[in-house]
Image (cartoon, rainbow, N blue to C red):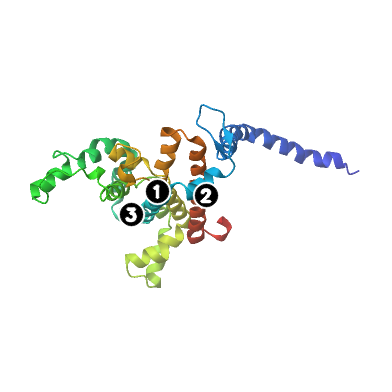
Amino acid sequence: MFNRKKAIKGPKEDNLLAYLFIGPYLILFVIFILLPVLMAAALAFTDFNSIERPRFIGFDNFIQMFSGDIVLVRHVIPNTLRFALIVGPIGYALQFLMAWLILKIPRILRRGYTMAIYSSSLTGGAMMAVVWVVAFSGDRYGYLNNFLIWLGAITGPLDWTQRETSLMVIMIFVTLWSSMGIGFLSLQAGMFSVDPQLYEAGVIDGISNGIQEVWYITIPAMKPQMLFAAVMAMVGTLRAGGIGVELSGMNPTPRYAGQLFQNHIDDFGFIRMELGYATALTFAMLATMLVVNRVVFKLLGKKEDE
């Protein structure tokens, strides 16, 4: 005779076992991710200076963001967009180019070249202190000043990281130099995973040069890796900010020339101690990242990934 209770006992036990396995992760997720996000969301609607009790002010922080924060509207948003639209696509293209060039060299040399290129992202902070700050130093012993004076291009040293016209250019250059990070490794892994028989079949079908090979075979075969690298590149540039402070030695940067969104958040959160407004700025940056992710998924992702 069919026993309904016995028949449904198995799936319930399986579900209980599954919950036991994912239980530790769920607990940690709630404690360290969900609760902090919810608390931050509540803090964005308050006036809080880290000492006094938070005071609820409604949407005043978000109204202040776009109607009263002149620095944000005139400097931070244009600087961040300029920085992201230059560094993101160019850095992504450089990552793809370097990964493709390494694919073309003999196998015995690939590991050494990969490590040499990837090391720029690992030693970014150390190189910033040892090389780039010295290279663009404002005295005559700075590498750039010394070289230009020797050439006769300038008569005296220039303080490059304090000049409004040069700080952003230096930030873009240094960021591109250190952009060969996890996205570069992802693209390289994608290229190495392409079936060599596809290239042989492409030659038979009429592909005659490397550009056609990349366009018709390599890129379609590594869409997931390209999507991941693109998201990492754009999100990384949107949340950048430390580089301008490290180069100039101050936050805000001189005349807000290198002030990015992350700098603005740090300024209000850790210098002015206006934590409620800093949290509102953080959620605005998060919303921007979500929009960028959707655009990247539309361009490079599959329909089931959206």
Q: Where is residue 148 in the image (x, y as percent from the top left)?
A: 13, 48
In the picture, the quarter occupied by the C terminus is: bottom right
Query: Could you tell me the amino acid type at mark 1?
Result: Val
- Asked if residue 299 shows in the view, the reply is yes
Whichever of callouts 3 and 1 sits on the residue coming sooner in the sequence is 1
Q: Position of residue 258 (x, y in %)?
A: 33, 46
Query: Could you tell me the amino acid type at mark 2?
Result: Ala
- Identify the residue position indicated by label 1 in the image: 76
- Rendered residue at 40%/72% (across/down): 205
Whichever of callouts 2 and 3 sits on the residue coming sooner in the sequence is 3
- Identify the residue position indicated by label 2 in the image: 287
- State the image quarter where residue 243 is shown: top left
The nearer-to-camera label among 2 and 3 is: 2
For disc 2, the neighbor class at 10 Å (few under 14, some 14 to 19, many from 20) is: few
In the picture, the quarter occupied by the N terminus is: top right
- Rendered residue at 12%/46% (across/down): 147
Label 3, secondary structure: give it. Answer: helix
Label 1, secondary structure: give it. Answer: helix
Query: Could you tell me the amino acid type at mark 3?
Result: Leu
Which of the numbered marks, if any, corresponds to residue 94? 3
The CA distance from mark 1 to mark 2 is 16 Å
The nearer-to-camera label among 3 and 1 is: 1
- Asked if residue 188 shows in the view, the reply is no
- Rendered residue at 62%/35% (across/down): 26
